[in-house]
Image (cartoon, coloured by chain):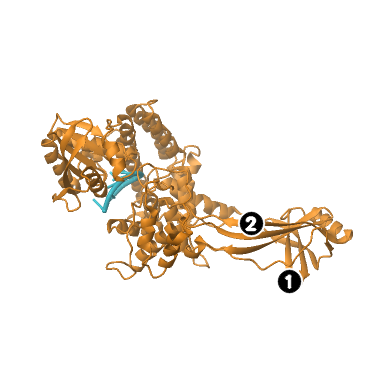
Chain colours: A orange, B cyan
Amino acid sequence: MPRVFCVAEKPSVAKAVASALGGGRFQTSNTTNRFIKNYETEFRFRELGESSVVVSSVAGHLTSLDFDSNFSNWRSCRPIDLFEAAIVKKTPESNKAIEKNIKTQSRRSQYLIIWTDCDREGEHIGTEIANAAKEANPRIDVLRARFSNVEAQHIIQAAGNLVRIDEKQAAAVDARIELDLRIGSAFTRFQTLELQSRYAELARELISYGSCQFPTLGFVVDRWLRVKKFVPETFWLIKVVYRRENMNVNFSWKRNHLFDRLIVMILYERCLESGPARVASVIKKPASKWQPLPLTTVELQKQGSRFLRLSSKIIMDHAEKLYQKGFISYPRTETDQFDKEINLQALLGKQTENQEWGQYAQRLLEGEFKSPRRGRNNDKAHPPIHPIAHLAPSGAGISSDMYKVYTFIARRFIACCWDDAKGNRTTVEIDWFGERFTAQGLVVLQKNYLEVYNYEKWESSEELPPFMQGEIFVPTVAEMVEGKTNAPTYLTEPDLIAMMDANGIGTDATMADHIAKIEDRKYIFKQPRQNGVMELRPSTLGAALIEGYDQMNFEQSLGKPFLRKDMETKMKDICEGRRTRDGVVREELERYREVFAKVSRNLNILREV
DNA sequence: GCAAGGTC
């Protein structure tokens, strides 16, 4: 019987694969790493026949890239030399036990099947596993399973359609790893050494550069500059109020406001002289507020930090722990659509025992259930974030913040399975000598998902008195009002995450880390607004770095997202065969070499800012 | 004392 060794990217997937292949039957044994287990079972592969199977996993990347030890001392070479310094692939001490398990199992196996996540990084992790396996057993045949979720049926199907590792995707990641290391380290050492020697107050600071850190900082600085440079503009508008049945109805001008005082005055006077206003239309329409989409990581970080007032980093740390304890599904996902196979009713059933929101889950199971909306994203690796097991607020080792995160995930999940909120909206539009004004009234009839998703508000407005189309009236109040435009506000953490997401800076798993890092490096700081919302402001150092780099080299500025975006494009080119790994590394290093030269020549600009 | 990306 052939011996087959399967390796997943993380322990949870290894267990799911073993369970699927073994029809629920498998034997567990420990390895010397306390998180990693080996699961033994049997399975009849279409291509390999009845086999004895061991399923295990790594925990993310197995190896890491670093400079040869000759270059690890900061004074051992000029920073620019790091662009071509010798580099070595190492298995970090923390992964030695995992590597040893892979080698031991590979020695006694004829086949290795890679079960890492089916994304670019997963493909590279697959080559890291394969390399370790081949060192121990050069004749092992390496195969790859393609799967997009861990439902048993799907896993079995993947096991029957094995392919090979996609070397192009792995090569793209290999290029990224080398570039991030060389460029990040070179600029970090350069900036740090130069600025430390010039400024006593920076003598002890690490002034890091990273292809994600700096564009992230750039967004914060850009907004700060817009706030700083803002000049308020005066505008004018026509305000109309009509009092009927003891209610003041405020009509807003369809032109909103204009910046030309004379024109507003002319329009205003014409209205006044024209006599009464006429009701042009009364439209009563059903209105709804849509049920939220299934939860992705980016959305968890954005909405979580908005509603829970916790930083995205803290939210992700709690989500990770909740996942490890088995309370929620995998917390790093881009998917906002549930697979058809998933049993949503069973998941809702688990929530019925909750004191606060169990009643809502119960109602859905008794008939109010509605299928979740399907978003546009599917990473083909993980489902949307959802609660798996019920968690009581007093559970052992559960902090109140962790419970807040769980509460958000659970309420959001129930909300996804409930109908839109529904109501009626009445819009009264009046015509006053050609100028149009509207007043709106909203009556909420059914709150539906908003009952459980109490983070959002959608409430009935003050009721409108009845109006009839064609009737005429003289407004009670008609005034010309002066106003001023407001300055833009500083970015909040959800704003920043949205910008990073839109510009491809970082991944769902790393965005929170980048924000935490630039705060830790004292490039930005958080400042509470009057309403308690935290806003992000650059420090003097953070602003000086970005402004300085922007002045030296705008198009290719280190503080703009363009360089990182180009790298992303080139990685896609490698994946699709238009470029090679070595070619991209060479081109990108060449490009950053120019930036480096320019920055070295213009360091005085940094000093002046 | 450097990066970003996985995950524990």
Q: In this view, does A284 lie to the left or right of A300?
A: right
Residue A586 position by quadrant: top left
Q: In this view, does A486 lie above or below A376?
A: below
**Chain of the residue that carries numbered disc 2 in the rendered image:** A
Q: Is mark 2 on a helix, strand or loop?
A: strand
Q: What residue type is labelled 1?
A: Met
Residue beneath label 1, please? A247
Q: In this view, does A262 lie above or below A465?
A: above
Q: Which amino acid does label 2 sit on?
A: Pro
**Chain of the residue that carries numbered disc 1 in the rendered image:** A
**Extreme residue toward the bottom, this view:** A246
- Sequence-first tag of 2 and 1: 1
Q: Label 2 to label 1, Cα distance in Å?
A: 23 Å
Task: State whether residue A146 appears in this view.
Answer: yes
Q: Residue A542: give x, y in percent of width and height.
A: 44, 52
Task: Choose between A583 and A436: the one closer to the eye.
Answer: A436
Question: On residue A286, which mark appears?
Answer: 2
Task: Choose between A311 and A364: the one closer to the eye.
Answer: A364
Q: In this view, does A605 lie to the left or right of A249?
A: left
Q: Residue A147: give x, y in percent of width and height.
A: 32, 39
Q: Residue A188: give x, y in percent of width and height.
A: 34, 45
Residue A113 position by quadrant: top left
Q: What element carries label 1?
A: strand
Residue at point 40% right, 63% down?
A: A407
Q: In this view, does A65 lie to the left or right of A600?
A: left
Q: In this view, does A493 lie above or below A93?
A: below
